Amino acid sequence: MFSEGVSAYLFKSKDKETIRDILRQVASGNIVMSEAITRCGINDMKNPSFIMLMPEEKEILVEMASGQTIKNIAGRRRRSSSAVEKVLKRVKERYNLSTTYELMAYLSRIGII
């Protein structure tokens, strides 16, 4: 389900404050899973195959990998260049990388793009 763009999975029994916290995390670009889900077999989140990209993130990265500039990508998406740069920054932080070049090389190496 995460590969289809789901950002979080939570049980209805969660209290309101926990739900608010999860929604804040998702709004910041994070993927959130409950402990029950992680105990069901996804216990090694350091494995690159479990690190997911949101659909928009993947689309932007594929466009960059094909040689498009941030300005061109932003124009086609009717977004500002800074909005596209924020997406890239969020993904770089998730993968603990400093530059877009490092990010592209890493994602290519592990077969995500």
Image: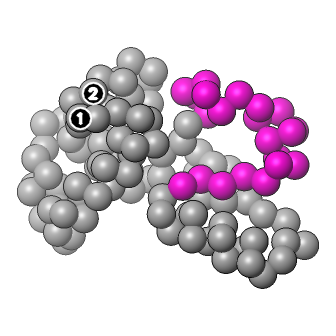
Give the residue at x 14% y 52%: 70
Q: Amino acid at mark 2?
A: Glu
| Secondary element type, mark 1 | loop
- 14 inside magenta stretch: no
Residue at image mark 2: 102
* Label 1: how many Cα within 10 Å (few below 14, some 14–19, many 20+): few
Residue at far top of view: 109
Give the residue at x 66% y 59%: 8
Is 53 displayed left or right of 86 in the figure? right
Residue at image mark 1: 99
Q: Quadrant of residue 50?
A: top right
Residue at far bottom of view: 16
Asked whether the beta carbons under mark 1 and mark 2 sit within 8 Å of each other, the answer is yes
Q: Position of residue 26 (x, y in %)?
A: 56, 64
- 39 inside magenta stretch: yes
Q: Amino acid at mark 1?
A: Thr
Q: Position of residue 84 (x, y in %)?
A: 24, 58
Is 80 displayed left or right of 44 in the figure? left
Residues 68 and 45: in front is: 45
Give the residue at x 35% y 41%: 92
The answer to whether residue 113 shows anywhere in this view is no
Is 106 displayed left or right of 80 in the figure? right
Give the residue at x 59% y 53%: 31
Residues 66 and 86: in front is: 86
From which residue to which does the magenta span run?
30-50
Q: Position of residue 80 (x, y in %)?
A: 17, 69
Q: Position of residue 104 (x, y in %)?
A: 29, 30
* Label 2: how many Cα within 10 Å (few below 14, some 14–19, many 20+): some
| Secondary element type, mark 2 | helix
Q: What is the distance, in whole Å, between disc 1 and disc 2 at their CAs?
A: 5 Å
